[in-house]
Image (spheres, grey):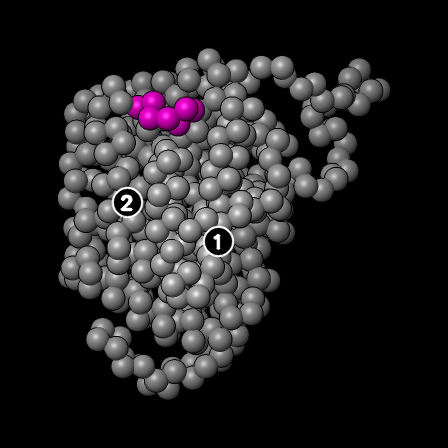
Amino acid sequence: MTQQAPDKINVSWFLPTHGDGRYLGTTEGGRPVDLPYLQQVALAADSLGYYGVLIPTGKSCEDSWLVASALAPLTRRLRYLVAVRPGLQPPTLAARMAATLDRLSEGRLLINVVTGGDPVENKGDGIFLSHSERYQVTREFLDVYTRLLRGEKVDYHGEHIHVEGAEVLFPPVQENGPPLYFGGSSDAAIDVAAEQIDSYLTWGEPPELVAEKLAVVRERAAARGRTLQYGIRLHVIVRETEEEAWAAADRLIAHLDDDTIAQAQKIFARMDSAGQARMSALHQGSRDNLRIAPNLWAGVGLVRGGAGTALVGNPQQVAERIREYQALGISNFIFSGYPHLEEAHRFAELVMPLLPLENGASSKARSVNTGPFGETIGGDKRPVRQVSAS
């Protein structure tokens, strides 16, 4: 089943609450990720016209809800994609938290539904459920959560979740609650998405693999009378020339040794996440298998779980790859780059003007003193943007 490509896209950024730096797998070039630094990244994303920011979740990160609560008052337009955790949070508590943060942010909350794919971390959080049981919990959680945010008083008796007289007294700003985002590659995950999710997310696999996956999701959603939005999560390494971009990719993993890669791959292998298995299969833990498609590089996944691929190239190449994913039906793009503050600026300056943005800096006129492409010339002349021919 096909779906018409969206005319416009949204581009979001990422808050590195699990650490940041110039290199992967080393303290060399690292920087402290404290509140002032996260404020800088959020304010940059807000002023540069990003649609929102994804805040990661898990024991390796600062708590996403507290971070979003601290940053939302500082920004004007930026949305915050924050995780609910079925099995770790009761749906009533999650619904109240979502409604409150949606009100405090004046309707700028997005919800990322995270089932959790690491059995070891899950057990540390008190979750001793199989893969299939976790998705059953997710389905029941969302049944209760969505009804609460629609304003219902809920009695529910599922296999895992039981509530009587549950309600949210203070409603969210967004009608029926913030949009639900969700990623997962297993059959159970795709069924949850088809039934209950607004925007299905995939990690950055080669376009042909993404197309195959989205076709399955569309078919199952259509069988339920539903149409979803689609999103993709990628890193990005863009420079003015392709040669500079690939050199930057090589530098990012310059301090990685084989032992560090092996340690990371051992951790990923213990997971029962189908999506993580697909990511790991792209490079098989080897530096020799990193260029997996035109301008698509799997080097990040050598030591980083989850999103492990990056678009690499000059601005025109990166924009073209984005348009290829857009042609598959993807309208929500979530990017990141190391370090996240500098790369937020670089991507916004080099690539966003080339994209058909639904909400962003290039989609509306901006009246600023500096052009917006640099400082005045000789204190008297406003600069004119020069478009590279490369």
Q: Position of residue 31 (x, y in %)?
A: 40, 31
Quarter of the rendering occupied by the C terminus: top right
Question: Which of the two discs, 2 and 1, labels the residue nearer the N terminus?
Answer: 1
Instruction: Identify the residue under disc 1.
Output: 229
Picture layout, residue 290 above or below residue 133: above
Residue found 16% across the figure and 40% down from its top: 269
Picture layout, residue 302 above or below residue 162: above
Position of residue 66 in the picture relative to residue 314 (left or right): left
Q: How many marks?
A: 2
Element under label 2? helix
Q: Nearer the viewer, mark 2 or mark 1?
A: 1
Query: Foreground: 44 or 242?
Result: 242
Q: Position of residue 114 (x, y in %)?
A: 33, 56
Q: CA distance from mark 2 to mark 1?
A: 19 Å
Residue found 78% across the figure and 17% down from its top: 377
- What's the amino acid at mark 2? Gly
- What's the amino acid at mark 1? Gln
Position of residue 40 in the picture relative to residue 138 (left or right): right
Residue 259 visible here: yes
Q: Quadrant of residue 370?
A: top right
Q: Residues within 10 Å of mark 2 (few under 14, many from 20)?
A: many
Please provide the residue range marked out in magenta.
Answer: 290-296
Position of residue 15 in the picture relative to residue 143 (left or right): right
Q: Position of residue 9 (x, y in %)?
A: 56, 44
Disc number for residue 275 = 2
